[in-house]
Structure formats: C-alpha cells, structure tokens
C-alpha cells in the first residue's frame, strides 16, 4: 500500500508565495515521475508541473517562470514552490506519483490541498 500526503496549501494574497510538499510512503521500490495537477471549480484537471526521477522538469505554460518543482528522492518527497501567485491559480492541487511497489507499477494520487489566492 502506498500513500501520498500533501501539505502546504492555504490562503494567500496575489503576488504571494506558497510551498507545497507531497510525501510518499509505503512499500515503495522506486518512484518514477512525480507531479502536481490542479482542478479549479468548473474546470478540468490540468497538469501543472512534473519531474522525472532524474530531475528533468516540465511546466504548464501558465506557471512557467513562477513555479518550481523539485524532489528529494531519499525522502520520496516532491515539492512545488509557487511564487507570484495569481487569483487564477486558485484550485485544489493534487500530487501524483508513478510508483513501483511490490510487483506492480501504477499511478497514485494524494488527497489534495487547497490553494486560494485573493486579489
């Protein structure tokens, strides 16, 4: 069993910063890509940022230059530093990880953390 637990969401004014963290635990053999997705009310879920086990990153155009994803492989944890936040960044943010545990490899999701940016 693998669990992803997110932390770091909250309420912030436009222009402010937040740092999200997501820690994976359980019978993990290896973690491949880890990423953050978000879903705003009335909108579809979208990929925000992803990082491979080797450290390669990819970002949505809307957050490029403002958000930075990183990971600590020793702690099975992925982070996302969010700077210059805008009201349109308001959403539930969900951690995703491609995990090999036991004999299986599959995607796991965290429970989500809310980010609210006030104007």
Image: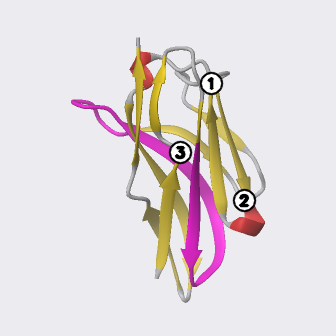
Q: Image point 47% across, 65% down: which residue?
A: 107
Which residue is most to the left?
A: 42
Provide the secondary structure element on which disc 1 rests: loop
Viewed as shown, does residue 27 lie left or right of 2?
right
In terms of depth relative to the viewer, which is nearer, 71 or 45? 71
Numbered mark located on residue 8 in the image:
3
Residues in magenta?
Answer: 20-45
Provide the secondary structure element on which disc 3 rests: loop
Which dot, 2 or 1, sits closer to the camera? 1
Numbered mark located on residue 83 in the image:
1
Viewed as shown, does residue 49 lie left or right of 113?
right
Pinpoint residue 82: horizontal percent, then vertical percent. 60, 30
Q: Main secondary structure of the magenta part?
A: strand
Which dot, 3 or 2, sits closer to the camera? 3
N-terminal of the pair, mark 2 or mark 1, is: 2
Q: Image point 62% across, 24% down: which residue?
A: 83
3D distance between C-alphas at marks 3 and 2: 22 Å
Provide the secondary structure element on which disc 2 rests: loop
Which dot, 1 or 3, sits closer to the camera? 3
Reply above or below: 20 against 23: above
Circle 3 Cα neighbour tier, 10 Å, few/some/many (<14 / 14–19 / ≥20): some
* Cβ–Cβ under 8 Å for marks 1 and 3: no
Place residue 42 in its image quadrant. top left
Which residue is most to the bottom?
A: 103
Callout count:
3
Q: Image point 49% across, 76% down: which residue?
A: 2
Identify the residue under disc 2.
53
* Cβ–Cβ under 8 Å for marks 3 and 2: no
Q: Image point 35% across, 39% down: which residue?
A: 45
């Amino acid at each position: 069993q693998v669990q992803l637990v997110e932390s770091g969401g909250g309420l912030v004014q436009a222009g402010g910063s937040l740092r999200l963290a997501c820690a994976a635990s359980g019978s993990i053999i290896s973690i491949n890509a880890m990423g953050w997705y978000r879903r705003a009310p009335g909108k579809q879920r979208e990929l925000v940022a992803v990082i491979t086990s080797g450290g390669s990153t990819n970002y949505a155009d809307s957050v490029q230059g403002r958000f930075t994803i990183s990971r600590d492989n020793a702690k099975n944890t992925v982070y996302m530093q969010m700077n210059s936040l805008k009201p349109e960044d308001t959403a539930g943010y969900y951690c995703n990880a491609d995990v090999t545990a036991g004999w299986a490899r599959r995607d796991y999701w965290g429970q989500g953390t809310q980010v609210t940016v006030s104007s």
